[in-house]
Image (cartoon, rainbow, N blue to C red):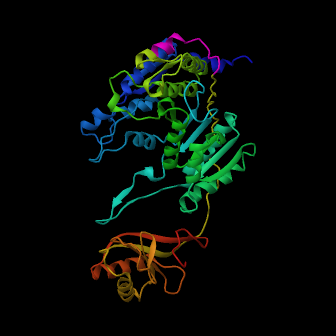
């Protein structure tokens, strides 16, 4: 088939890419990657922006210079080296900041074995992890509520979930993938993970040619570690996807071999899966394969598929010819231990050559799509409130419950008290371990709806008696279905 004029135009078009060199081994592996791109005559230029350790230490907690955002808007394709986020002191993960600020909702992480050339216990494995990239616990909304208890909010939304699910199915369709496995924990988190799983099953009906299965994350992760060949595309919420992609990278050879793309509607970012590895920085031993593979994904994204194939094939030929960096070198026959620069030299020497045994799946850019799940027009009714109290953990729940009932009896009914999600009143068990974080669930004395003024009245009464309430969560029903997790006996 002849190449279309459009494809030729994209292939030969000069493009400017925003460059973040990163920290630790970042500058080294980025340097080799750019050498390879230049030798391949990729038609890319780079606009470097400041981000990472030096920016953090200058006092900018986000880790990225303010003027960098304008550069990214002008050149919305980013090539990024790994970043070191200083621990503590309020520093924010730059990766999370960029992904969330720029709406990079889809994280695509392929993991493929290179057997028999790179040692693996799981030959013939070819997986793509598609991870939701903006929501879940990575929203980073955390609070310390008492001396003993902290919390992290898990946020899963309808449009955010539909977006990543549709992307996964369009990716599978475009790339000839046959099955998507959605991994969640909806047997425990029935509302949040349950929403993710339900939308997955709903959207799956529109793609009958693709097998869709759901799996609990714990057994799914175990199977991925032990029998990865059974998977094709794995879809998961943010936290699970992060963990699963590292498992996939390790079982297929090394985290140093896996690249990653972060796709948004306006901006896309390409990077290695691994971190900045400051302990080996400057020693010429880092493996640049991951960021090179990310660059191959970037070239495909930019429509430069022939350049992507050129570099991809050179990498595969280099692996076949036995060149290994320290992380994957096992002193096998016909292999040579090389440094970062020498590995780059070997790839450059093989530009234009094809591998004899290894092959790689082409990751075609999926087609665009629109969100189409109808907005639910459910009747939303306020039926209760959970009020969280900071109370010493040695307080007797029976005494606490009876006291609160007396205080609030003319306004709302105290249905139960829990501690870390376990009911301790009424009829709690004496063996239950307690912290200083008690949840009191109030409902209407007669059932049915309550009003906000009922909640404020109860809070006022509790405050007048010296109770320290630390947060509230309103309880709503949607078309009569509880929009909150039920306690024992509810």
Image position, residue 261 (x, y; %): 52, 34
Q: Measured along the vertical axis of the image, is residue 10 above or below residue 169?
A: above
Q: Give the quadrant of the N terminus.
A: top right
Q: Name the one closer to the observer, 174 or 457.
A: 174
Image position, residue 379 (x, y; %): 59, 69
Q: Give the quadrant of the C terminus.
A: bottom right
Left or right: 151 as drawn, with respect to 349? left
Determine if the magenta segment contains residue 399: no
Left or right: 353 as drawn, with respect to 468? right
Q: Name the one closer to the observer, 272 or 52.
A: 272
Q: Name the one closer to the observer, 145 or 326.
A: 326
Q: Residue at x 56, y 43 (%)?
A: 225
Q: Residue furthest left?
A: 58
Q: Residue at x 54, y 39 (%)?
A: 248
Regarding residue 425, the answer to whether it shows in the image is: yes
Q: Measured along the vertical axis of the image, is residue 434 above or below residue 267?
A: below
Image position, residue 150 (x, y; %): 35, 61
Left or right: 146 as drawn, with respect to 305? left
Which stretch did the figure color magenta?
Answer: 344-357
Tally of numbered discs: 0
Q: Name the one closer to the observer, 151 or 45.
A: 151
Q: Quadrant of residue 355?
A: top right
Q: Quadrant of residue 95?
A: top left
Image position, residue 483 (x, y; %): 54, 68
Left or right: 447 as drawn, with respect to 90? right
Regarding residue 370, the answer to whether it shows in the image is: no
Q: Measured along the vertical axis of the image, is residue 143 above or below residue 60?
A: below
Q: Residue at x 48, y 46 (%)?
A: 134
């Amino acid at each position: 088939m002849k190449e279309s004029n459009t494809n030729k135009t994209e292939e030969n078009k000069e493009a400017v890419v925003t460059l973040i060199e990163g920290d630790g081994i970042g500058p080294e592996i980025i340097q080799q990657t750019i050498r390879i791109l230049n030798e391949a005559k990729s038609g890319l230029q780079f606009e470097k922006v400041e981000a990472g350790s030096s920016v953090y230490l200058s006092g900018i907690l986000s880790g990225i210079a303010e003027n960098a955002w304008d550069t990214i808007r002008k050149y919305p394709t980013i090539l990024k080296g790994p970043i070191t986020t200083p621990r503590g002191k309020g520093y924010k993960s730059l990766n999370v900041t960029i992904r969330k600020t720029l709406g990079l909702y889809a994280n695509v992480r392929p993991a493929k074995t290179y057997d028999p050339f790179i040692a693996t216990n799981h030959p013939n494995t070819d997986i793509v992890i598609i991870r939701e990239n903006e929501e879940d616990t990575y929203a980073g909304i955390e609070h310390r509520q008492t001396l003993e208890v902290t919390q992290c909010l898990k946020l899963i939304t309808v449009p955010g979930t539909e977006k990543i699910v549709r992307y996964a199915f369009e990716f599978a369709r475009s790339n000839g993938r046959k099955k998507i496995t959605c991994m969640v924990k909806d047997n425990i988190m029935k509302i949040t993970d349950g929403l993710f799983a339900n939308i997955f099953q709903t959207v799956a009906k529109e793609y009958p040619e693709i097998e869709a299965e759901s799996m609990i994350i714990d057994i799914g992760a175990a199977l991925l570690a032990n029998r990865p060949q059974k998977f094709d595309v794995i879809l998961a919420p943010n936290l699970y996807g992060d963990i699963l992609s590292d498992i996939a990278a390790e079982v297929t050879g090394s985290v140093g071999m896996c690249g990653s793309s972060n796709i948004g509607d306006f901006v896309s970012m390409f990077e290695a899966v691994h971190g900045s590895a400051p302990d080996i920085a400057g020693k010429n031993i880092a493996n640049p394969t991951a960021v090179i593979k990310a660059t191959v994904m970037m070239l495909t994204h930019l429509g430069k598929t022939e350049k992507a194939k050129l570099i991809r094939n050179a990498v595969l030929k280099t692996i076949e010819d036995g060149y290994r960096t320290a992380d994957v070198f096992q002193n096998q026959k016909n292999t040579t231990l090389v440094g970062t620069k020498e590995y780059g030299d070997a790839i450059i020497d093989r530009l234009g050559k094809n591998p004899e045994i290894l092959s790689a799946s082409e990751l075609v850019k999926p087609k665009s799509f629109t969100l189409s799940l109808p907005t639910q027009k459910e009747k939303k009714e306020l039926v209760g409130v959970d009020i969280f109290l900071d109370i010493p953990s040695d307080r007797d729940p029976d005494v606490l419950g009876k006291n609160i009932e007396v205080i609030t009896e003319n306004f709302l009914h105290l249905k139960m008290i829990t501690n870390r999600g376990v009911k301790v009143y009424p009829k709690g068990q004496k063996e239950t371990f307690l912290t200083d974080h008690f949840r009191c669930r109030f409902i209407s004395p007669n059932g049915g709806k309550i009003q906000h003024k009922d909640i404020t009245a109860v809070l006022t009464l509790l405050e007048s008696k010296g109770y320290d309430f630390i947060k509230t969560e309103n309880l709503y029903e949607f078309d009569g279905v509880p929009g909150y997790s039920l306690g024992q006996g509810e």
